[in-house]
Amino acid sequence: MLEGKRIVLGISGGIAAYKVADLTSKLVQAGALVDVIMTEGAQRFITPLTFQALTKRPVRTNIYDDWLGEDTGHVGLAHNADIVVIAPATAHTIARLALGLSDDLISAVYLSTRAPVLIVPAMESGMYSHQATQENIRTLTKRGASVITPGEGHLASGATGIGRLPEVPEIIAAITSTLGKNGPLAGKRVVVTAGGTHEPLDPVRFIGNGSSGKMGYAIAQEALYAGADVVLISGPVALTPPPGVRTMHVTTASSMEAAVRDTVVAADALVMAAAVADYAPAEPADQKIKKAGETMTISLKRNPDILGNLAEIDLPGLVRVGFAAETQDLLDNARQKLDKKRLDMIVANDAVASIGSDSSALTLIKRDGSVEQLPPMPKQESAKLIVKRLAALLTESEMPRTPNA
Ligand code: C5P
């Protein structure tokens, strides 16, 4: 996602400036071209040489340096940028941006650029909470900038409170989603389910399956990168939710259904990648079940079919994508599910090869009957393609329908 992207990174004078060296290194490692610009204050905390060494590019500190014409100064930087990131953004820098000043490089680039802008405030909590700073942040947000809420915890002042620079992975996630502001899912709300479900037998045991959640998590991440506002409804899995994605943790099929119902009403698309248990113990025991005879019989009851039940509900404009993990008659079974659950697309895969694995060979079947066979590829790559197809389905669903069609 960051490969070849031109990032202008404005560093202003807060103690968190030292943490931005790590951010810069990670961005460069991800393939980005990072042009660092620093305020006078930033250079008191960390030297330009650090960033020059990390980026292998000149670091600019003065609006009057290198001024050989429009293309070499702040105007060139601003025009060539794919994104402008200001981290840390001090109260002072935020105020000058809100005022529209342009007497330093950061403010001049901010005014000149038409690329998306991400502001990462970091300061003492009193300064952050002050009405002046909050109003300035609101002004910048209203004008289209993305602003990350700082973290809470230990501050350099010795106090504990809000104002910490968010962790590097969180900033990188915000950079990628801000880059996606012009992406194919910009402005869309996408709900993704992932992982298996656990259906309790007693307080310590459950019936579950081996779904790792990798596919759903990868789709959530790619949808975020494509600009969507993403809700991930996750069963119990050993994965860290992608930063920037709103994650709801659920355990059983019933709790997953409740979460889907709550979120889908405001969504443009639902991608049900979760491997939901079809049955649950009919009467889970209150206490741990003691072992007794040589065999044991457990009575099961049907779980709600989340997608199946949604088929009965009119949610105009909602694009629905399901998965079919099969061990036999893959395409026939998948087509039947597509019809029965009234889906726009179904992603068919071989259950044995795919569950828990890092790669998959998927077949995408759309409601119009078209079939696309994808070659085996890592799940992150398949997720990228699924998100691309999802974006196309969303565009189609927006097109005015011809009468009688
Ligand atoms: O019918 P089957 O379980 O094979 O259908 C798979 C699709 O339906 C998947 O998208 C899965 O997430 C969804 N599903 C569901 N509720 C269930 C079982 C599966 O929504 N109880």
Image: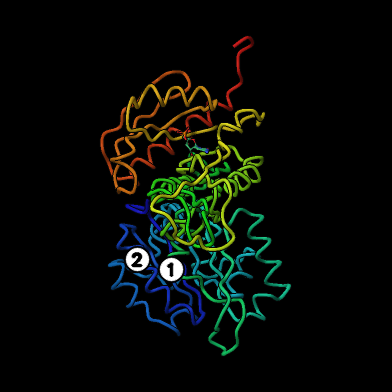
Q: Which is nearer the eye, 378 or 39?
A: 378
- The amino acid pointed to by label 2 is Lys
Q: Position of residue 397 (x, y in %)?
A: 56, 26
SS of the residue at dot 1? helix
From the viewer's perspective, is residue 126 above or below residue 211?
below
- Label 2 neighbourhood size at 10 Å, few (<14), some (14-19), many (20+)? some
Q: Position of residue 106 (x, y in %)?
A: 51, 67
Q: Which residue bears the numbered disc 2?
A: 26
Mark positioned earlier in the residue sequence (1 or 2):
2
Rounded to the nearest angstrom, the CA distance separating label 1 from label 2 is 8 Å
In which quarter of the view is residue 34 placed?
A: bottom left
In which quarter of the view is residue 360 placed?
A: top left
Q: Residue at x 44, y 35 (%)?
A: 323
Asked if the residues shown at circle 1 and circle 2 are in contact, with their CB atoms under 8 angstroms apart, the answer is: yes
Q: Which is nearer the eye, 96 or 348?
A: 348
Q: Residue at x 52, y 60 (%)?
A: 118
From the viewer's perspective, is residue 41 above or below residue 169?
below
Q: Which residue bears the numbered disc 1?
A: 168
Q: Position of residue 285 (x, y in %)?
A: 57, 56
Query: How many numbered callouts?
Result: 2
